[in-house]
Amino acid sequence: MTSLFEKVTTQRILQGAWFKIRSNGNRSNLPETREAIEEFSRDADSQIRQIQRNLRRGQFAFDPQKGVVKKKASGGGRGIVMASVRNRIVERALLDVLMTNVPFIASVASLRTSVGGVPDRSVPHGLALVTEAMCENPWYVRADISGFFDGIPRDKVKEKISLYVNDGPFLELLDRATSVTLQNEEALGEDRKLFPTDSDGVAQGSPLSPLLGNILLYDFDREFNQRGIQCFRFIDDFIIFGRSDRNVRRAFEHAKEHLRSFGLKCHDPFDPNTPAEKATAGNVKSGFVFLGYHILPGQLQPSDKARKSIIAKLTKIVESGKLGIQGALNEENSYACRQRYVQTLDRMDRVIRGWGDAFAYTNARDTLTDLDRKIDGQIKNFDTWYMKKARGVSDRQKRRALGVGLLFDSPVKSLRELPFRVAKSASFRKTKNTIIVSTDGSLHRKAAREGLRDVGGWAAIFHDQDREISGSAQDTTNNEMELEAVVEALKSTAEGASVIIRTDSRYVFNVARGEGLVRSNFEQWRLLEQLVASRRVRLEWVRGHTGDSYNERADQLAQAEADRASKAHGRK
């Protein structure tokens, strides 16, 4: 019989996990996530085979995660853990194997009253349960569980899983997958407390975390759906319905006791200091917010928070569009930025469609009409601003601002710049005199966000030599700066030297190994070829932002150079 560990390390399971991670990542609002997915996609099959080999040999090590603090509208922050693509693939593979091979886990995932982090059920199913319950149970209590993911007692959940899973290697891999090791722990400072500790908590953002929470609260979900009480839960947000105010109050007190047994607490709607966003109670005729909807008997509409959110998001898109249009006009180049007029409208349209799909179950159409009026105002104001910018300029400039590229702006190429493949370097053998250098390149932050060519910086850190070099350039790209860092590092070594260059740039690493053609930056690549020919060089790729001190220092120095050069040229 095939063990769970053998199953989780098959190509079929790992490839299936990758497809799901890729699909979710491509829809992410975070550029960093989408870029990581794109980078992994370039040689996904090879990397997945490597993950499989390392898992089976017991050599797979999870990358340290990056802690990101997301500010809350109510103040304070929420700790989000961002893991590498390879981490998420293994985590997702573990999840899929547990869901399909362990009957207890399948029963947890199929519990009708839990609608978050489970297959085939989500917000719409929760809405259906709530609207049905309201007909016979007019009293409710709704509450958030405080710091849910950070407070999950991981050892208790693992103990529960081990009752149904007798596979040591699988459990050991699951234990490591659910542990949190932050690569930027020191930089987080006081915000470190927002993230899980060694013994308690799971990573908010991991594919496994909702399942662990559902396992922990499996008995909770069953206990509070009997004796005239109904309880529905979406991850850390639950709502209790009953026939009387007394009944739901009593059930809520029992729910608090149940949560306390796990070291968890929930917000109390009967405490006058509790904000309505965290907990409410009363008669359903007064209405309540759950699952992003404001719910009344016979009426579903987007909550006030959800309505404000879409307007704020569209406002941010418009501001980005204005920056892009201004950048294209200033540079007199269609390709100086990604987002201009038509791209801005396209982004707005995609956000509106996604938001509309999320709130497709609303039956308060007047609310949507009111939102459309506000969006109409945003579009009208953007149009007015755009028309002023386009007034009196040449047809070429109008098209640049519009967002339809000019053929005239296409990069000019010479027959002396034919695509070529970089010559392979001579065989390499590391010696005690080998020089090791970590390099990185960076673009000014605003330019990177808006897709503009701008000032950039590069840096090289010489290991064991206490030496750093760095510089900057105008009208450049991130790839150019990554390549320039390698060129400058080699120029700083003597001919005949033995050098290991460490870079986190897939572009530089792949092209330098002859895996792709040189199609731009010809002078830099030709110079790199010459430098490599007169030295013994090995290029190594390292994963960026995973706690490597040399890589992190190179990144900081390159970014500082870009920012310094930007200020020197009067840019913000």
Image: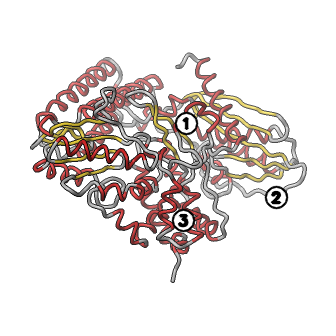
Tell me the CA gap for discs 1 and 3.
38 Å
Task: Name the residue: 48% across, 45% down.
Answer: 151
| Residue 320 can be seen in this image | yes
Q: Which residue is tagged 3? A: 45
Ranked by sequence position, the earlier of labels 1 and 3 is: 3
Question: Mark 1 is on which residue type?
Answer: Lys
Front residue (pair 234, 551): 234
User: In the picture, residue 466 is in which quadrant?
Assistant: top right
The label on residue 541 is none
> Are the two marked residues, 3 and 2, in contact with CB atoms closer than 8 angstroms?
no
Question: Mark 3 is on which residue type?
Answer: Asp
Question: x, y (%) of residue 202?
Answer: 50, 49
State whether residue 105 is above or below residue 249: below
Ranked by sequence position, the earlier of labels 1 and 2 is: 1
The label on residue 193 is 1
Q: Is residue 74 left or right of residue 506?
A: left
Tell me the CA gap for discs 3 and 2.
27 Å
> Are the two marked residues, 1 and 3, in contact with CB atoms closer than 8 angstroms?
no
Q: Is residue 401 left or right of residue 439?
A: left
Label 1 residue SS: helix
**Visual colour scheme:** secondary structure
Question: Mark 2 is on which residue type?
Answer: Phe
